[in-house]
Amino acid sequence: MKTKERIISAALLLFNEQGEANVTTNHIAANLGISPGNLYYHFRNKNDIIHCIFLQYRDHLRQSFTPIEGPASSAVWIHYLDAIFYVMWEFRFFYANLNDILQRDSELHRQYLEVQQELTINLQLLLRELNRQQVLMIPDDEVDDLTEVLKMLVSFWVSYQSAQSLNPKISQSVLYKGVSRVLLVLKPYFHLEHGSELANLMAHYQALAATPSDPFHK
Amino acid sequence: MKTKERIISAALLLFNEQGEANVTTNHIAANLGISPGNLYYHFRNKNDIIHCIFLQYRDHLRQSFTPIEGPASSAVWIHYLDAIFYVMWEFRFFYANLNDILQRDSELHRQYLEVQQELTINLQLLLRELNRQQVLMIPDDEVDDLTEVLKMLVSFWVSYQSAQSLNPKISQSVLYKGVSRVLLVLKPYFHLEHGSELANLMAHYQALAATPSDPFHK
């Protein structure tokens, strides 16, 4: 891995573990055993590093929330729901502090809004396709508002959990709980025929949410 | 109004209009035409003022989200939904910056968690009573999780809206949109018999959300 990539990857790890506000460029350099000067050769400042992490976030959203191809099987649901989990987990420092990070960097905020706009359109298409396949039965004039509720739920789940405890610990199980809340909001719209599939999905994510420790590390 | 109350009331107004982070105790004193010394006679610091505003927030939650008495008419629904709007509007500075404010004051955070716990229990009782009256039909084992989704939606609607624009303006119509999202999440659980009542409620709050200006001031 090149130095620039090593810096991005160490920064992401430190931001997620210690909170972005508590990590300076000096911490990142020290963590990698490189000099601050070396870090500044690659990045002007911390925001510059955050921009690069943001590009990873954007790529993940673009690659994961593409339209469905073929029938919506359980595997397809797991693909999208796991992608929600992954983005919340991998970029949890970003969600934990979203408004602060966006407010201090209007260029980043502008790019964030662009990506959100794309994502909104993709999610609306996805729900309409699930309607068309008669997996979901969302009234057509409610698809856009429901998409917004789901986006909001995912975007602020980490913040909500942080407010709910004096010593919040954003563990994987907390985030799987968020994923199962997405399913809960969609549950009333599932076609009866897909009831057992839904029940299996709910059970799958509730089991992951009930796992106290984080069994795997990337 | 006594000086202490005037300070609390001016601080709330300034926090809401300019954002809590941008308002100092000196701004508050200047706004009232009193000396900083006079303000410090009543409050040790800004957090001390925020504590007093928090007590108003707590009182509002305690008074507004009490259990239903009698049958759940449209008037009852409007009571609760207007109370949601009121708390989001009246304390919007708090919601705009919830995690920052809580993280820097663990005593406030502790009291916040106490109030949230009370509120959660009251909302669960409320949904169960609406189930009992056959207005809603929420599966009993989903009441608690659905309560959490609704609480989260209300608590982070202001933050979500702030992230969604480069120059966010938290207007009353934006918050009424939040109220209509609460109805949207509950809509699938409404008993068919109450369909027209629900449609009227939806139309009422969607009309308020579509009003571009803020027609009234408290």
Image (cartoon, coloured by chain):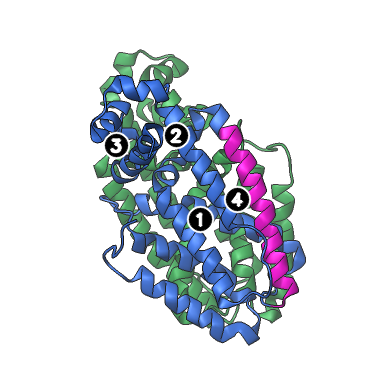
Chain colours: A blue, B green
Q: Amino acid at mark 1?
A: Val
Tell me which label, 4 or 2, sits earlier in the chain: 2
Residue that label 1 marks: A154
Determine whether the residue tagged by mark 3 lies in a helix, strand or loop.
loop
Discs 1 and 3 share one subunit: no
Q: CA distance from mark 3 to mark 2?
A: 24 Å
Q: CA distance from mark 4 to mark 2?
A: 18 Å
Q: Amino acid at mark 4?
A: Arg
Q: Amino acid at mark 2?
A: Ile
Residue that label 4 marks: A62
Discs 4 and 2 share one subunit: yes
Chain identifier of the residue bearing label 3 in the image: B
Tell me which label, 1 or 4, sits earlier in the chain: 4
Q: Residue at x 26, y 64 (%)?
A: A213
Image coordinates of residue A153 in percent, x first then y, are 52, 56
Q: Which mark is residue B104?
A: 3
From the viewer's perspective, is the residue at label 1 or at label 3 nearer? Answer: 1
Residue that label 2 marks: A50
| Residue span colored magenta | A109-134
Chain identifier of the residue bearing label 1 in the image: A
Q: Residue at x 46, y 18 (%)?
A: B31
Tell me which label, 1 or 2, sits earlier in the chain: 2
* Chief secondary structure of the magenta portion: helix
Q: Amino acid at mark 3?
A: Arg
Determine whether the residue tagged by mark 1 lies in a helix, strand or loop.
helix
